[in-house]
Image (tube, helix red, strand yellow):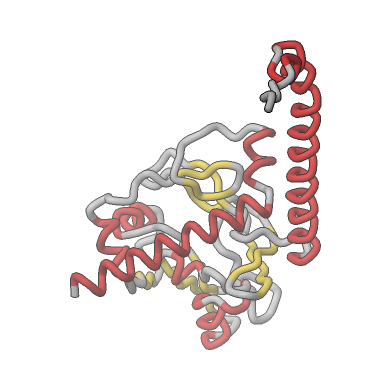
Amino acid sequence: MQATASSPDAASPAVAVRRWPRRLAWAALALLLVLLALGAAELALRIGLGGATLTPQVFEPNDGVARYRLARGLHTLAYQFGRTVTVSTDAAGNRLTPKVAPGAAAPLRVHLVGDSQVFGWGLSDDETLAARLQQRLGAGVQVVNHGVPGFGPTDYLATLAGLPATEPVVVVHTEENDTWDAYRIFRNAHATCGYVTTFSAEASALRCAWMNLRLVQFGAELWDRSQRRAVASALKVVT
């Protein structure tokens, strides 16, 4: 019985070359489908979030002890902990504390200094610690919210240095990360495109467009949650 030989043309270089355009076309089609799927997911996230970002875009670079601070005169929406919150800053670059009654400035000011607890991470302007204190003290007192997420004792000292010595100040120290910050472990935070990042980079149109993608923010949020769970698990093992 005669053996059937394979066709010489099947493995010839000419045939292989002719197959490349088809392979490239399939690869281009697959890439296009992936981009369309990502675009659809981005659009769905933006519609679902109603224009809100997944973290408040209210930070700017700073040359002081802390390498970032709150930007001045901003009003934005952020989707945090399953709901949309309003985050505003006043003309001095502090978290806005709504007044009990609009009008003339109060004769007495009380300053709150702290980190995200005082800032009100995940809370709207009228839900923060400063806002609740303002409601209790009334229109005769103006409560100023100096809380900034990520700040710690070294930053508190810098904040205190700029406050009048004759006005009451409350420093809120609540979590272990405040103590860690005293040893300057987490000093690699910077503000880029309105967000706090762990890398130092100049803001550019391309970089800001990338950071404003809700898919990128969603991925960063998932990564942050996984890191928090890992730290919590490590603390349980230690204790």
Position of 23 relative to 157 (above/below): above
> Where is residue 67 drawn, in percent x and y?
43, 43
Quadrant holding the C terminus: bottom left
Q: Specify the quadrant of the image occupied by residue 4.
A: top right
Residue depicted at 54% across the width and 73% down the height: 142
- Quarter of the figure that contains the N terminus: top right
Going 22% across and 53% down the picture, which residue do you hit? 183
User: In screen coordinates, is 238 left or right of 23?
Assistant: left
Depth check, front residue: 143 or 82 = 82
In this view, the residue in front, 122 or 71, is 122
| Residue at image point 50% right, 67% down | 119
For image coordinates 69% across by 63% down, the residue present is 77
Q: Quadrant of residue 49?
A: bottom right
Q: Where in the figure is residue 53, as x and y percent of width and height?
A: 67, 58
- Left of 26 or right of it: where is 197? left
Residue 83 on image: x %, y %: 66, 75
Image position, residue 127 (x, y; %): 58, 79
Tally the numbered discs. 0
Relative placement, left or right, of 185 versus 10 is: left
Which residue occupies the foreground of this view, 117 or 172?
117
In the picture as drawn, the residue positioned furthest to the bottom comes out as 136
Question: Please, which residue is most extreme toward the left here?
Answer: 238
